[in-house]
Amino acid sequence: MTKVLVQKESDIAKILISNEEGKYNLVNIKFMHNFIDSLRMLDSNKEVRFVIIRGINNFGAGADIGELRRASDNREYATNFFSTMFEMFRTLLNLSKITIVNVEGIAYGASMEILLATDFVIASKNSKFAVPGGKIGVFPPVMLTLGKYRLGWNNVLKMAFLGRELNAEEARQIGLVYEITENFEETNTNLIRELKQIAPSSLSMMRKILFTENEKELEKAFQELIDQVLTEDARTGVISFLTKTKPKWAIL
C-alpha cells in the first residue's frame, strides 16, 4: 500500500511517499485522496512556503494497473478514477507554495506526470523517467498538455508517442530535471536558500501565472482519457500487461 506522510519544520514541509511492502509506489484512488488532502492542508498553512515531495526508494510506477483494469470495464469507475486524478493535478497546479520534487529510482506514467505540475525536480543519478501509457492503450494527459510547454514538442513525441525511457542526464537535458544530485538534503537546502532571496508574493504570483492557464486544457484531456480507457485497445493493453503478453491492437 502506497502511503503519504507529512512532516513540517518551520517554513518547509515534506510529503513522503512510500510503500512499506518494498514495492513500487502506485497512483490509486486511496493514494490520490491522501495526496490531495495533504496538499490542501499545507496550502492552508500560512507558515509553509516550500513543499518537498519525495518518493522513498522509488518515486512511483504510475497508475495502479489493477484499478486501470477495473476502469476499462466500468464507465462509472473510470470517471471516478480519472476525475480524482485530474483533481490531484488541479490541486498541484493551484498550490500557492513552491514545490521541489526529489526523485530516486523510477518515475513512470502518472507518477512522472506529477513532476510536470511542480517547480523544481531534483533527481538521483539512478533515476529513470517514462510515460509509456500508449503501450497499454491509454495516453499521458499531463505530458500532452503541460509537457509541450515545459519540455517542447519533440520531447513529448519522444516520451509519449514513442514511449521512450530517459535516464537522469537525458531528463536534465530536456528540462524535466533541474539538477542531478547525490545528496538531496544539501541540494534542497541550497535551492531554498536561493529562493528565499525572492519576495514570497512574487514567487507565488509567478507560479500562478505559469500553471493556472493550463487547467482547462488539462481537464479536457482527462475527459478524453475516460473515453479512451473504455476502448477495446485499452482493455487489450491492460490485459496484455497483466498477462505479460504482446497486445494485438484493433485495426481502425
Image: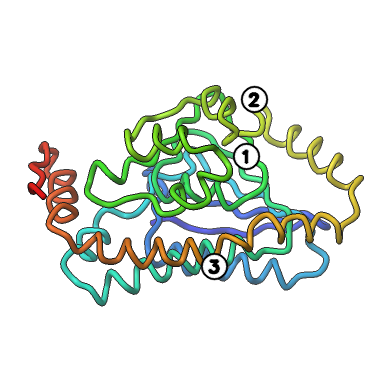
Of 139 and 7, the residue lying toward us = 139
**Amino acid at circle 3:** Ile
Q: CA distance from mark 3 to mark 1?
A: 19 Å
Marks 1 and 2: CB-CB under 8 Å? no
Q: Position of residue 228 (x, y in %)?
A: 25, 60
Residue annotated with mark 1: 121
Q: Residue at x 25, y 65 (%)?
A: 227
Q: Which image quarter: residue 73? A: bottom left
x and y, in percent, of residue 61 in the image? 38, 44
Write the residue at 37% across / 40% down: 160
- Please report contact status of discs 3 and 2: CB closer than 8 Å, yes or no: no
Q: CA distance from mark 1 to mark 2?
A: 14 Å
Q: Position of residue 87 (x, y in %)?
A: 49, 69
Q: Residues within 10 Å of mark 3 (few under 14, many from 20)?
A: some
Of the numbered discs in the image, which one, if any, rests on residue 182? 2
The count of marks equals 3
Could you tell me residue 167's position as x and y percent?
A: 47, 25
Along the polypeptide, which appears first: circle 3 or circle 1?
Answer: 3
Three-letter residue code for mark 2: Glu
* Residue in the picture at 81% in, 35% down: 190
The residue at which mark 3 appears reads as 36
Local SS, label 2 = loop
> Quadrant location of residue 181?
top right
Give the residue at x 10% y 45%. 249
Comparing labels 1 and 2, the label whose residue is closer to the camera: 1
Q: Is residue 70 left or right of residue 63?
A: left
| Mark 3 or 2, closer to the camera | 3
Instruction: Give the residue type that dot 1 points to.
Output: Val
